[in-house]
Amino acid sequence: MVTMTEVAHAAGVSVSTVSHVVNGTRLVAPTTRERVLRAMRVLGYQHHPIARSLAAGSNQTIGLALTAASNPYWVELVQGIDGEATRAGLNLIIVDTRDEARHEAAAVANLLAHHIEGLVIAPADGWRDLTLPMLRDHPVPYVVVDRIDADLRVDQVGVENEASTAAVVDHLISVGHRRIGLVAGIPGLSTSAERLRGYHLAHQRADLAVDPALVVDGASTSEGGRRATFALLDLPDPPTAVFAANNDMTIGTLAALKAAGIKVPRDLAVAAFDDFAWADLFSPGLTTVAQPSTAIGARAVQLLLRRMHDPDAPPQTVRLPAEIMHRESCGCSPKT
């Protein structure tokens, strides 16, 4: 069965653009729309319109609400969700939350207006005040993906953020680094908090005090990562290693180091959360935490299907392990 991901690849557009063309949830430029329709015809993509499904008593459609940033992690996560939904015979409508609470609430309201049967959501900071009350007022099963909220008793799936961050910082400490900068993600997101806890945990295990000046907000963006890295380099006692807490910030970190004439790892060791398909093509290769992003997406749909079939089942929180990719950017030889 052909998936939206395959159509998107053939048309040279994002999966969310294909979703908008298929479901009519947003205007798409005529030339882009025609490319998508042509790819659907060539590949034989089959879509079951909502109206026809409603006549049968079920629309067989789930929604996905997350930021549409070009971050490769989100792209792979969507692929996992789309593939698992297709295998289950479900249609998928994707909306962009822009990682902003008010826009997220409006996007989810749009999904609910399409009478979706379930929802997968990567919540923005502030979602408890706007989106969560809306979901509690609607009998729609939902699963939280990536950004796990430990205080909520709902179905959730993500990666082991704290343990994997601690493992990388442990490694940097073990090879002699005592001042390790952290380019941190958006405050208020559980992923940012968990990676910060992992950073602190590694220091506690090594009996090292954390200098607060070494933890800088990178806003989860490449530009934020660039600014944060310059701030670290400008410290009176700058770090000897830097950990960037997502792959967008890693790009900004590397750009700042290049602009400053800093050689990695000769002058500064670098490690990062999120792997790149081309991380080992850097010179030196980039040491990273690789998330099983496609598997996280697929597991989210599996949890949603379970909830749709058994509304009274106890909620599950699933943490999938990450893999540490040891390469040369931390100042070590790569591990095989």
Image: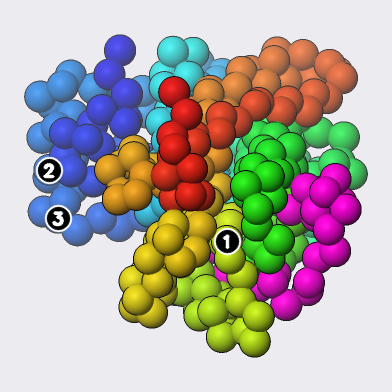
Task: Identify the residue shown where x is 80% and y is 53%.
Answer: 203
Q: Disc 1 designates what residue?
A: 241
Q: Disc 2 designates what residue?
A: 35
The residue type indicated by label 3 comes to Pro
**Residue 223: horizontal and vertical position, in percent?**
44, 73
Left or right relative to 192: residue 82 = left
Element at label 3 = helix
- Above or below, 198 against 124 in this view is above
The residue type indicated by label 2 comes to Arg
Q: Disc 3 designates what residue?
A: 30
Earlier in the chain: of badge 2 and badge 3, it is 3
In the image, the segment drawn in magenta is: 199-224
Residue 202 shown in magenta: yes
Query: What is the C-alpha distance between the residues marked 1 and 3?
Result: 48 Å
Left or right relative to 214: residue 106 = left
Image quarter in which the N terminus is found: top left
The residue type indicated by label 1 comes to Ala
**Residue 188: horizontal and vertical position, in percent?**
74, 62
